Amino acid sequence: MTRDPRYDILFEPVKIGPVTARNRFYQVPHCNGMGRTFPSSMAEMRRVKAEGGWAVICTEEVEIHHTSDHSPWAGGRLWDERDMPVLAKMCDGIHEFGSLAGAELNYAGLMAANRYTREVPMAPSHIPVASHDPLQARAMDKEDIRNLRRWHRQAALRAKSVGFDIVYVYAGHQLSTISHFLSPYRNRRSDEYGGSLENRARLLREVLADTKDAVGDTCGVAIRLAVDELMGPEGMTSDGEGRDLIEMLAEEPDLWDVNISSWENDSATSRFKASGFQEDYIGFVKSVTSKPVVGVGRYTSPDAMVSLIRNGVLDFIGAARPSIADPFLPRKIEEGRIEDIRECIGCNICVSGDNMFVPMRCTQNPTMGEEWRRGWHPERIAPKTADETVLIVGAGPAGLECARALGQRGYEVTLADKGDEAGGRLVGERRLPGLAEWGRVVDYRTWQISQMPNVNLYLESPMSVQTVQEFGADHVVLAAGARWSADGIGRQNPRGVPIGDGATILTPEDVMAGTRPDGPVVVFDDDHFYMGGLMAEALRKDGCEVVFVTPSPEVSSWTHNTLEQHIVQARLIEMGVEIAVAHNLTALRAGQAELACIYTDRTRVVDCAAAVMVTMRAPVDDLWDGLHAASLPSLRRIGDALGPGTIAAAVHSGHRCARELGEDIDDTVPFRRELPALADGFGT
Ligand code: ADP
Ligand code: SF4
């Protein structure tokens, strides 16, 4: 297939100072939970993106000096020359495919508590560090400022000799000391680095000039700036100082990489923001500079990309998440395979990996983070090892991905589901408020499967122990999923919640099927991800009085990992949901729920017509129990049927099953590890 000429504009080369990007696809800097901790994994992940057609591929934050140490986050490091080989490996992989490598140098200041180095952090003015560590950053004097400039310059020189083509001056996300100087609410200085915008921008201007002087002959020098901090006149605004600053420095950098801050605004989830949501803020930038501009907005549609270029909004289509969900997005557009694009669903499971200091994972792309350690390529997979048939029971995320990947390997696959719609848990969940984009997990896979003559999906096909046996497939894979429990068993109540006669209990499946109680509802959330909050939201939207009860000190606490917690809690408050945090549900009776404070055990009673239990899911295991006893030649469980978890985990489980079928897998440690190297000697 060849590319549609409408998209030719996306493949034009663009100059960034002394270097030229081969097309307009630009992977902006993004964290990945690998960085320096799992460097081979990080380098291979970036290399695969170059193979997939991204013309520019950047690092995550790269620490420039040991006095700004972001441990335990696994970013990049260029403290000295010993850090260079890791980033050189990344650059080599990127250059293999003719792409450019960009380094986002950063001095995080008050954002980094120096937990490893134990140095005292620095900031424009005395202030506690942003994490809740019992530690303050000290105000920088003139010598500190000179030192910071020198460290940045040295790091830029190291970046150049490592092989980077683009070097960043980072002033975004309130994550860098340069942005803290810029900030009217963090910078309380009265010298020439404080006060007016001109003064607050002095450090940015100086570091930019230093960087251009040091490496600008061969490297493009970029500024990454949050033009709006969504905090009104307290911060940068796109019609105030954000704009003034870009006008002031318009022609100084070789590229403007613009976004909004903080990170949770820049990486907003699809639950709360639509694709392209940043355009209102960054749309003006190109009108005040002749330098190329890159911006982001979860862009996955080539038509939208073309209109951004043609309408003069952007020169480069920036992407972090769309490049994670589909590292081959540019190649697919170039090859005229638009319908093969695996579109990001905006769930931020990727961010959760970084926040938990492990290689990031992706709901849509099960190979993310597995490129090096398991050798999984996002587009290629080993052919089948035998002419065999596979029956998969359950067309949820796990079964769909398993069928798709086995189909790609060439197996004859039958996928059976008792429902009248494919998607399993997502049949209901994609219809919850804000989760429509999550349906892409299903749509991408059902489309791919529909194109494979060797894979057949049968809906309204309930399978029993007998029908599975009669079917006679060489391999049986059970992807029958899990169902929410109604007994309250969970973390806080491992033996369940006492339920009296006449009490009405609902599960999330009941609510998703449309059941609405006649009276106030208690939503008991002992799960802590999105489902509890969404139950409250869906019920409140339909006019129910809702009391949200959780043993956690806050609503949907795990959503900190997806950068959503503050918005979820705000939404419930604004909708008029009554919130009882740090409370357990200790008993349910007809018309009443008993709650107990988790610290004092003090109880109180609330009226309720029903309670929705969001505590745990029980695997559907009737087929497993029956077939296990029948000793089939090849039987396995995947996804929620094996262990209920995230949709990302189910997709990964389905993919893994497909990769491993018919292969010899070493089950001691079934992937390559990056082991720490011992330094020489003992003692001092
Ligand atoms: P996962 O997240 O692991 O993919 P889901 O719960 O999303 O799990 O999907 C499981 C799917 O399995 C559901 O669509 C359900 O209808 C289907 N299923 C469960 N038991 C059977 C069965 N006996 N026969 C056919 N389909 C089944
Ligand atoms: Fe997109 Fe979710 Fe994948 Fe992140 S994890 S890239 S948000 S699909």
Image (cartoon, helix red, strand yellow):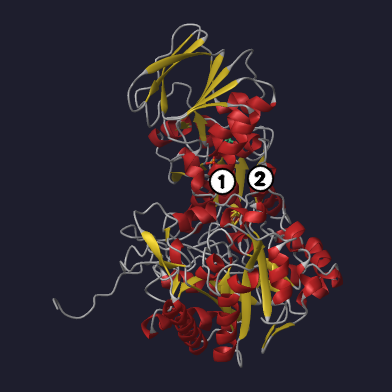
Instruction: Give the secondary structure at mark 2.
Output: loop
The quadrant where residue 256 appears: bottom right
Q: Quadrant of ligand 2?
A: bottom right
Q: Earlier in the sequence, mark 1 or mark 2?
A: 2
Image quarter of the N terminus: bottom right
The quadrant where residue 225 appears: bottom right
Image coords of residue 291 (percent x, y): 74, 79
Q: Amino acid at mark 2?
A: Phe
Number of numbered tags placed on the structure image: 2
* Residue found 59% across the figure and 38% down from its top: 570
Mark 1 C-beta closer than 8 Å to ligand 2: no
**Circle 1: is it few (<14), some (14-19), or many (20+) Cα within 10 Å?**
many
Badges 1 and 2: C-beta atoms under 8 Å apart? yes
Image coords of residue 330 (percent x, y): 70, 70
What residue sits right under mark 1 in the picture? Answer: 564
199 w.r.t. 639: above or below: below
Q: Residue furthest bottom?
A: 217
* Residue found 56% across the figure and 72% down from its top: 170
Q: Amino acid at mark 1?
A: Glu
Q: Disc number at residue 310?
A: none
**Circle 2: is it few (<14), some (14-19), or many (20+) Cα within 10 Å?**
some
Q: Give whichever of 257, 514 is nearer the camera.
A: 257
Lateral position of residue 252 relative to residue 590, left or right: right
Q: Residue furthest front?
A: 190
Q: CA distance from mark 1 to mark 2?
A: 9 Å
What residue sits right under mark 2 in the picture? Answer: 272
Mark 2 C-beta closer than 8 Å to ligand 2: no
Q: Give whichever of 79, 310 is nearer the camera.
A: 79
